[in-house]
Each structure stands twice: as structure tokens, then as C-alpha cells.
Amino acid sequence: MNDHHILTINGGSSSIKFAVFHLKPSLHRGLTGKLDRIGCDGTRLTFSETERAAPQTVEVAAADHLAAAEFLLDWLESQNILSNVAAIGHRIVHGMQRTQPEIVTPEMLDELHRICPYAAEHLPGELSIIAAFRKHIPSVPQVVCFDTAFHRTMPRVATLLPIPRRYEAQGLQRYGFHGLSYAYLIQELRRLGDPAAVSGRVILAHLGNGASMAAVRNGQCIDTSMAFTPSAGLPMGTRTGDLDPGLFHYLTQVEGMTPDQFHRMVNHESGLLGVSETSSDMRDLLAIESSDFRAAEAIQLFCYQAKKWIGAFVAALGGLDTLVFAGGVGENSPGIRASICRELQCLGIELDEERNAENASSISSKVSRVNVKVISTDEEIMIAHSVEEIVRRLDLSL
Ligand SMILES: Nc1ncnc2c1ncn2[C@@H]1O[C@H](COP(=O)(O)OP(=O)(O)O)[C@@H](O)[C@H]1O
Ligand SMILES: CC(=O)OP(=O)(O)O
Ligand SMILES: [Mg+2]
């Protein structure tokens, strides 16, 4: 594969993260960056030449994902990234029943377009990025890695939605997301020698802008907090998480809200942002919580719901051996982890204050029955490994 490299793309609802992975001498990360605040004022590109280099920032004018993808392509071209790219790997939130990464084909794109309403905040943007790459560098293979794949082991009862049975035939069921992150966390637990990763009961808490949890037994997912769409489960930066279904009727009747307005409220105007009326960013809220009761309440709500989901998953798992915090909030905020775990001694969860304050890799106290860990998640490396495996198997770039 000469000096070819793999480009990974992680298209979120308002950001595109990317990373270049060199294949020789063995897979390792080079240029890394992200375009964020897509669709808002102040879209910007932040990148680092290597993992240790200081990040640089460039202001970008891009009104939507397509414009952002076009900008990113031109920029990657100017950095000489595209001329040597062996393959591009994408995180795709929804893959229906698919369990493995796959090479993009026209038939698959047709199907993904068809299921865009299943993940309306993510899939259209992700597909426009794939389209932009196909247009500019049509001969470079693209591989898609599905967030839903990790959850395909869930027992049927955890996949059922309590709505009329006829909708199941249309694919309406609980799917679950953040699967690349979860697969990485389980792989890390295995590497660290945590026995629960292979035969035990684990709760994985991915707390970022989007937030979810997964319950894993014997290395296999048995339940997760996101459901048919990534709007379900825990409250998030701007998403509600689970919501009283009666609200829809109330707001359409009393406020004349349209379905599109409701969708917008649930996905973009709620969660931390909605309750705090200030920001969707946990750091902003933590900075003002002592002087702003709305920020304090938004944080309390987030932690309270996270605690309840842990309780629910302990019940589903029949106990707990390991709890893992990951994602921007889970990895970096001792205060949030402490609030979530406060008074969970009844479940065998007790934090060591000092190690929690240091974001240490193991943060449970000596008497804690449950191992509590902090792991920095890495969706990009999961994509890169999958792409490398497919590229080598199919001998694509030789
Ligand atoms: N030191 C920190 N303390 C609290 N929250 C943090 C810290 N660092 C990052 N965060 C929060 O992490 C969230 C972003 O998480 P991240 O996983 O990077 O997002 P994404 O879902 O876009 O991948 C933001 O709410 C941000 O405020
Ligand atoms: C699936 C999902 O919610 O992803 P993100 O957290 O990147 O928005
Ligand atoms: Mg994320």
C-alpha cells in the first residue's frame, strides 16, 4: 500500500470530525481535526498536524453539511491528503439490521437514503459527505461503519417499541446508537484485562453532546438508552431524550405547533440548552451553575436521569461489575461523575474522590464492589481498523 493512508469521517449532527491514519509501519494517527458549529454562526475548522501538535483554527463559511463537506474536501486537497488516500471510512449512525462495515455501493446508498427519516438529524448530512467524496474522487473506495451494529445482539424484548405491532414490519423498533464508541470501550476493557468485558455485567456511559448508555453482558449488548432515533434516552446537549408522548398532542393543540417545529424543539432546542436557556455545552453550564439556577437545574436534570438509567440497567443486567464513563463529559468532568454516582452505594458504586478529581483510569474506591472506569473513547480508530481490514482483504489499493 506504499505510503497510502486512510481517512476517517465522523459526521455528527452539527460537526464533521476527521482523521488521517497512516498504514506504515502499522496503523497510526496523523492529521486530526473537526469542523463544528455547522449550520450555526461561527462554523470553524480546528486541526492538529499530529496527536501532540497544538490545534489551529480557521473560520469557515458553510451553511449546511454539503457546504461543509465541499469546504473540507478542498481543504484536504490543499493539504495533499486526497492524492494518497487508499480508502475513506465513515461512521454512519443507522444501518438497520447490518452488523458489519461494508463498502459503499449505489444499492446501499439508495437504502440509506430511504431510511433517512430514521435518523433525520444525522443520516442526510452523512450521505451528503459520501456524495461529495464520490464526486471528487470517485475511484477511492468508501467504507461505512454502523453505529447500530453493536446493538444487534439485544434480546427481542429490548428492541420492541410498545406501539401497534403492524409498525414493526416497517422497521420501527429500538436500534441504539454510539455503537462504534461502545465497541471501542469493550475492546479497551479487554485490553486492560477487565474480566467483566468478556464475562460480566458492564454499563457503558457515552456522555458527549449526544449521550447514551449501553448495558453489556458477557461482551454483548443487551440494552441501550437510545431507541428508534438518537433523540431517545438521556437528556443531551440539545435533545430531550425520553419524553412524555402526550406532549406532542398538547403542543400541537394548544400552541398550534407543527410536526416539524416539534421535531426541531426535541432535537435542537431542548436538553441542557432548553433547561438552562444558556448553552448546550456542559463546560459553559458548570462555569455558571453557582450563580444561575437554570444552569444548575439543567446539570441536576442531566445527572439525575443518568443515575436513573444506571439503576434501570443494573436491574436489566441483574447486578453490575463495571461502569465506564466516556465522551467529552464522561471523560473530563469529575463533578458530573460524582453527582451521577452520589448515593449509589446501594448498587455497589463508590468513587475515590482523589482519583475521580484526576480523571484517573480507575476511579472507584477500594470498598466499591463495582469497578468504575474512565476511558477516552475513539470512534475514529474503530473506523480505521475496519477500513484497513477491508482494504487489505479486498487488496483494493495494490
Ligand atoms: N472538562 C470538561 N468538563 C465538563 N464537560 C466537558 C469538559 N470537556 C468537554 N466537556 C463537554 O463534552 C461535551 C462534548 O462532548 P464530545 O464527546 O466531545 O462531543 P460530541 O458528541 O460532539 O463528540 C460538551 O458538552 C462539553 O462541554
Ligand atoms: C448517534 C448520536 O447521537 O451521535 P452524536 O452524539 O455524535 O450526535
Ligand atoms: Mg460524539
Image (cartoon, grey):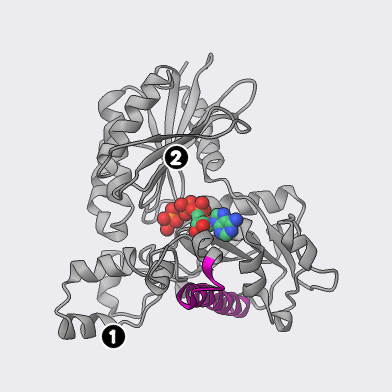
The answer to whether residue 296 is magenta is yes
Q: Position of residue 145 (x, y in %)?
A: 44, 44
Q: Position of residue 339 (x, y in %)?
A: 63, 74
In the picture, residue 338 is in which quadrant?
bottom right
Specify start and end residues of the magenta stretch as a single range: 288-316
Please identify, in this view, whether the residue under mark 2 or under mark 1 is nearer the observer.
Answer: 2
**Few, some or many residues within 10 Å of mark 1 (<14, 14–19, 20+):** few
Q: Residue at x 30, y 46 (%)?
A: 125
Residue linked to disc 1? 246
Residue 34's tag is 2
Q: Please, what is the three-letter code of the amino acid marked with disc 1?
A: Gly
Q: Please, what is the three-letter code of the amino acid marked with disc 2?
A: Lys
The answer to whether residue 196 is magenta is no
Q: Position of residue 208 (x, y in %)?
A: 51, 58
Instruction: Say left or right for 129 vs 187.
Output: left
Instruction: Say left or right for 260 vs 30.
Output: left
In the picture, residue 28 is in which quadrant?
top right
Instruction: Say left or right for 155 vs 138.
Output: right
Which residue ends up furthest to the top in the rendered image? Answer: 2
Q: Residue at x 32, y 63 (%)?
A: 268
Q: Nearer the viewer, residue 346 or 99?
A: 346
